[in-house]
Image (cartoon, helix red, strand yellow):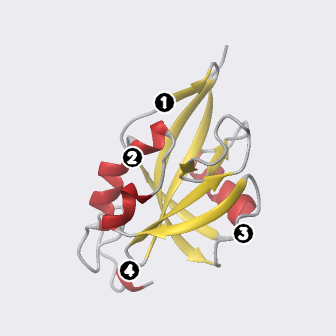
Amino acid sequence: METRIVVGGALIHRGRVLAARRSAPPAVAGFWEFPGGKAEPGETEEQALERELLEELGVRARALRQLPGSWPVRPGLELRIWAAELLSGEPQPLEDHSELRWLGPAELDDVEWLEHDREVLPYVAQLLARPAGRGPDGGHRPGWANR
């Protein structure tokens, strides 16, 4: 069986990361995650994440880099979480989510994360702690922290 990739996005904006509360399926409803979805055949992980964030949240985002780790979701599905930056739009819970919250570094433990998303929180905390002018990919971006 071929493994299909599921991408999640740690969407960073103004020193905070977006958390999304699942509304479905019932087994994960009420838990929080980094939004995303399945990559389509022929699509890169970056393309999949950018498309999924547009479909699920109505925003344009740019995938920057994969965070360490990958997790089996169920047989044939593997989750990889990427750092991403918000380019335009205001996130709305359009699909599979009932609530969205922007969390700062001190608030990452304020929601009940799905286990695999919880495992990347140390890396997300590092992204949020970057000095002004450093983007989530570590590169210098004048004004990045103020977007």
Return the disc, 2 or 4, that comes first in the chain's sequence: 2
Question: Quick one: label 2, few (<14), some, or many (20+) residues within 10 Å?
Answer: some
- In the image: residue 132, left or right of residue 45: left
Marks 3 & 2, CB-CB < 8 Å contact = no
- In the image: residue 109, left or right of residue 21: left
The Cα atoms of the two marked residues, 4 and 3, are separated by 21 Å
Q: Quadrant of residue 12?
A: bottom left
Return the disc, 1 or 4, that comes first in the chain's sequence: 1
Helix, strand or loop under label 4: helix
Q: Is residue 51 visible in the rendered structure shown here?
A: no
Task: Tell me which residue sits at (35%, 70%) in the image.
Answer: 135
Q: Quadrant of residue 76?
A: top right
Residue corresponding to mark 2: 67
| Tag 4: amino acid | Trp
| Tag 1: amino acid | Trp
Q: Quadrant of residue 129?
A: bottom left
The Cα atoms of the two marked residues, 2 and 4, are separated by 19 Å
- The x, y position of residue 71, in whole percent, is 48, 30
Helix, strand or loop under label 1: strand
Return the disc, 3 or 2, that comes first in the chain's sequence: 3
Return the disc, 1 or 3, that comes first in the chain's sequence: 3
The Cα atoms of the two marked residues, 1 and 4, are separated by 30 Å
Helix, strand or loop under label 2: loop
- The x, y position of residue 54, in whole percent, is 70, 63
- The x, y position of residue 17, in whole percent, is 45, 65
Task: Tell me which residue sits at (37%, 55%) in the image.
Answer: 109
Question: What label does residue 58 carry, if any?
Answer: 3
93 or 70: nearer the viewer: 93
Residue corresponding to mark 4: 144
- In the image: residue 84, left or right of residue 24: left
